[in-house]
Amino acid sequence: MGSLARAYGRPLAALIIGITVLWILALIVVPLGAMVEQSLWWKESAGETSLTIDRLYNDIATLQLDRDSATDTEKQAALDAEIVAKQAQATELEASEKNPRKIYGLANFTRMSELHIYIFVRTIFYALLVTLLALVVCYPLAYAVALASGPRKTVVLTVALIVPYAINELLRVYAWLMILDYRGVINGVLGWLGVVDLDNRGWIPFLENPSAVFVAMIYTYVLFMVFPMVNTLETLDRNQIEAARDLGATSWRIHRRVIIPHAKPGIAVGCIMTFMLSAGSYSVPQIMTRGQGGDWFSQLVYRQFYESNNWNMGSAYAVSLLVVCTLFILLMMRLFGVGLRDIAK
Amino acid sequence: MSAASTESRGAQLVLNIYVGLFVLYLFLPLAVMSAAAFNAYDYPSVTQWQGFTLKWFVALAHDQRLLQGLWNSLLVALGVIVVSIPAGLCGALILTRLQAKTGTALYSVLVSPVLTPGIILGISSLIFWRRFGVPGGLFVAVMAQSSFIASYAMLLFLARLQRQDRTQEEAALDLGAGHFMVFRRITLPFLAPTAFTAAVVAFLQSFENYNTTVFAIGGEWTLVTEIASRLRFGLSPVINVVGVIFVALTVAAAVTYVLLNSRKKQA
Amino acid sequence: MRGKDVRLDKVAIRFGGTTAVQPTDLAIEAGEFFSILGPSGCGKTTLLRTISGFIEPSDGRVLIGGEDMAGKGPNERPTALIFQNLALFPLMSVAENVAFGLEARGVRKRQRLARAEELLALVALEGYGGKMPSDLSGGQRQRVAIARALAVEPSVLLLDEPLSALDLKLRQHMRAELRAIQKRVGITFIYITHDQGEALTMSDRVAVMSRGRIEQVASADSIYADPATPFVSTFVGEQNVFPGTVVSANANEAVVETPVGKVSGRPKGALAPGAPVLVMVRPERLALDGRRENSFPARLAERHLEGASVNLVFEAKERRILAVVPNGPAARDLPEEMTLSFGRSDAMVYPEGPLANG
């Protein structure tokens, strides 16, 4: 902080620090904290409380009977005390029935239904699959772009990749919706070939299969894998490849020993971005299922907020997703031996 | 030296075909979507071609909700620029002056929004601002988007500041300039081109954003959230028209960029 | 413009646990061209930045013109610093660069640009005001930096190796030019360099610095002829070094047992019999005959013709010994086995201490 004040003077340094602190607090840390806090409590439901009250009154009635039939005074006194205690408890609960209590705990996480857990796991699995497939598809591509001969070719390839990348993801998903729709391009072609009968709704229902989301997702996020890899591969000294080839290494060995180690930070960043985007994607499943299916975890989260109006449960779902994404980032950083500073290009 | 010399001819051919197919894979769906904008058929389609028309463009021009969405998108983007450029600048200024250890900790906090799923940012902003009685809407959308767009801006400023010659600020100070004058005459002019770039990036990121915005926007809508909710219900070629405009603008921007760059290289 | 004197009063500078500058007293006179010479890392730049106000001394005081500078930032001191990389403002024209200090002082635009033009004339750059720094050559940029610093009418100009980026020819030219400008404006120049040639040719006085300590302050001539310590002796110019032990010593003469035999020389400091010492002889002081007081046999190993002089490398008792003699008949056709000698006044005897080359 001292060097900041020395460079820009106290008032400016204070302003700079103030704005940064405000950013951290109001936009990053406290909202995240609020979400975590929200996930850790719930309002006790009125139904449960009234059930408990009913049970208490039942107990009191039974105790009263016991007391009336009891003969020795000692036992009567003990039962009296118990009745008074139960009465007080009931009165307290009756008050809270009108104003339900906030209860802190992990129930929002543990109460996740089996179906939702299944969807959660499937989302993570698909996201991993998207990441892996994108990695396999993009590696040769990034290699070709980064080591392309001539500046002209580089420019053409870069533009060819940047244009689809820059177009809104919704529109990219929409394009696939048109292709896979009941009367979409594929069914249209198949109908023209006589394979399916469109007039009698004999189309193939691609959209009803969860893999439709998968196909569109790869298309939407594949380029997030390409650019980080191109960025690191571009810094590779080609003489290294030449030298390795000169020493008699096979192509496979050159990739394994020279190129892939160099591309590691790019691969890590690409994987992190692709996984994070697909695991947390709301746009792709929402459009591909046209809001009908509940295939993707992000859709469950949205429904908790905007349909069930259960923000506590929704927050718990969101926190779960965040935890998985954080674990994935840490895993990738460990696996590829890169620091956070390498990650931001 | 070229890739051709590092690969055998056969391998090079396979690689070229692969790249060609991939580019085709990227562009064909966009071409399908764009073509449907000019089809007279009521449902977006290229297989049921009913003749060329521009009527969907006219329909878009009269679509009040989409136009309002466009206006809202512009407002949000403007708000995001106003919030995230100063935040990103200040964060970068601090980070360049910090010791390695504290620096890494602060850096981690400041870039974390970039690595957080967009819906999480939307949700946490929604919850946070409701506690102050601010419901989801354009303001919350600005705040939610700024949380990660400011990080992008910061990364741009950081890269620029790493190339800064610190002695210039010292020289100005030594010549008798006050701290404020040093900042205004030396630091800011040096950062100005980056601020412009960051503003453009912030605008595009904000304008295109869906996953964060959809949670934070509440009952309001931007162009993108409106398109998304249209896609849920009746599909209309009007959306394809929006797509065509997006594609055309992007291609135009890319071509301009390439031309400007090649001219700069010639000069 | 008037120069002011600069006085360091027990100035010490520490960064964390390491001491960059040992407690130092130094008096630089008003209007003097003063150089601080030392190898990189010796603390000379730290000292300069302390005078200019970028670093506050950990101990002691800096006085400029008798005034204590404590608590005054670089923008409040009557000094101007010329940076090693010049630090011209690349986004401003040459004239704006030169006028920047006046802008900071609130001088009106017309006036300050007029003044900038005058200063550019002073450094022989009339008409260059409209150009950008990137359009100028290295030497021109150098002069812009000087003009920019002079514009604020400093009493003391501080120069941090400003010539190091230039090629040899230009560097030699700029030395003369700097000296001329200093004479013209009459203010105090404090010049930092690791290049002894620069320090010796330009300065009125030179301070030699090593490991955060000033070893000697003297005129260029006495630094070379009468170095105070083994470090100064070996850092400035070449020396033949003979380690040995004192046999006998008084104020005027010391006799030392060395690998090449018993030699006598001028003592530099108090010497007791048996103490380890270093005997130093300049290469040009060695004679190629046995006629001086101290003589010893040597074998000629290499001969390098330098032009006006010849460098002869001898070996004696497995030591390399350098002799420099004027080119001429006496320096040709030398026999392999010879006797070398040097006079008592040509040898200096120092108590053992660190040398410049480690």
Image (tube, coloured by chain):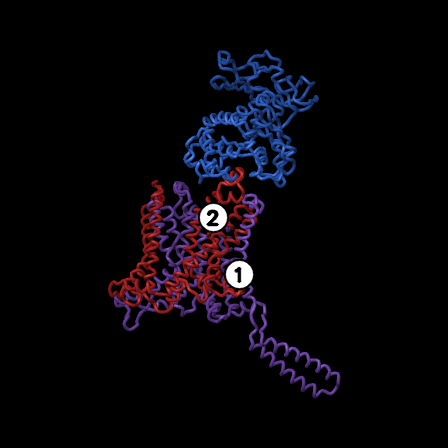
Chain colours: A purple, B red, C blue
Q: Chain of mark 2?
A: B
Q: Residues within 10 Å of mark 1 (few under 14, many from 20)?
A: many
In the rendered structure, the answer to whether residue B251 lies left or right of residue C241 reads: left
Determine whether A135 is above or below A4 in the image: below
Secondary structure at badge 1 equals helix
Q: CA distance from mark 2 to mark 1?
A: 25 Å
Circle number at residue B157:
2
Have a look at marks 2 and 1 and say if they share a chain: no
Determine whether A69 is above or below A103 in the image: below
Quarter residue B6 falls in: top left
- Residue C236 on image: x %, y %: 56, 25
Q: Looking at this rendering, what residue extends furthest in the right direction?
A: A73
In the rendered structure, the answer to whether residue A4 lies left or right of residue A179 reads: right
- Residue A327 on image: x %, y %: 51, 58
Amino acid marked by disc 2: Phe
In the rendered structure, the answer to whether residue B75 lies left or right of residue C242 reads: left
Identify the image quadrant of the C terminus of chain B. top left
Quarter residue C50 falls in: top right
Q: Nearer the viewer, residue A141 or B106?
A: B106
Identify the image quadrant of the N terminus of chain B. top left
Quarter residue A299 falls in: bottom left
Q: Nearer the viewer, residue C112 or C276?
A: C112
- Residue C322 on image: x %, y %: 54, 20
Q: Looking at this rendering, what residue extends furthest in the left direction?
A: B51
Amino acid marked by disc 1: Pro
Secondary structure at badge 2 equals helix
Q: Nearer the viewer, residue A210 or C34?
A: C34
Circle number at residue C256:
none
Circle number at residue A31:
1
Q: Chain of mark 1?
A: A
